[in-house]
Image (spheres, rainbow, N blue to C red):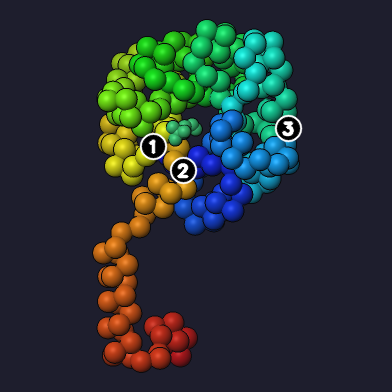
Amino acid sequence: MKLLLDTANLDDIRYFNTYYPIEGVTTNPTILAREGGDVIALLKSIREIIGDKKELHLQVTETEYDRIIAEAKALYAMLGPNTFIKIPATDVGLKATYTLSKMGIRITVTAVLSATQAMLAANSGASYVAPYISRLENICDDGVGCAADIVKIFSAGGSKTKVLAASFKTAKEVLDVAVIGCHAATVGSDIMKKLLSHTTTATSIADFERDWNAAFGERTLLSMLEG
Ligand code: G3P
């Protein structure tokens, strides 16, 4: 399952883009508001850090059809072809998804809270749908089950639309959507770190260092190899 980073924090994007196998960055208006400042400069910096080939998913803030189209085109023109325009799952959003995808601009239909919304988004030409896992789990609904239904519907119908699971509060939710076959997940910085860190890995590394140093002191394997 492909992993994207759900943040607009430049330090985090630099860090994870350097060390983790992330395939892109996603943001939404809340995430951009958290960073504040010059939004246009921020978006350009994100593109500069991740390069032209990685995916950048940016959400429209307009709600009227013509203005969504204008905003999407302007974002796409500014940030290049690997920019996906996020549009919330509404009636106007579906129409805009249809129009923009026909123009060759790829759309991620976002704020998906049901499998029927995902089906409509796919039928409107969305490249991705983004079901919100923890927002469903938080209201005693089944976020992972919803994503699983969407994966089954797309697979049964031979849909090209992919599932980009979003909104995670735990690393276990990320694991769960990987197991049920989501194509991608976008994960915040804290959860992304939790996907890698394990106390037993840390203690194992400490054990290796202690044992090596007890036997060989200051000499490293590299220094031995280099003679
Ligand atoms: O990017 C959208 C999605 O990840 C929202 O997440 O944590 O605000 O529910 P959250």
The quadrant in which residue 161 appears is top left
Disc 1 marks a residue whose amino acid type is Phe
* Disc 1 target residue: 168
Secondary structure beneath dot 1 equals: loop
Ligand 1 within 8 Å of the CB at mark 1: yes
Q: Which of marks 1 and 3 is nearer the N terminus?
A: 3
Q: CB of mark 1 within 8 Å of CB of mark 2? A: yes
Secondary structure beneath dot 3 equals: helix
Q: Which residue is drawn at 44% across and 26% down?
A: 130
Q: CB of mark 1 within 8 Å of CB of mark 3? A: no
Q: Which residue is drawn at 62% across and 42% down?
A: 35
Where residue 110 sits in the image (x, y, percent)?
49, 23
The quadrant in which residue 173 appears is top left
Disc 3 marks a residue whose amino acid type is Met
Quadrant housing the N terminus: top left
* Disc 2 target residue: 188
Ligand 1 within 8 Å of the CB at mark 2: yes
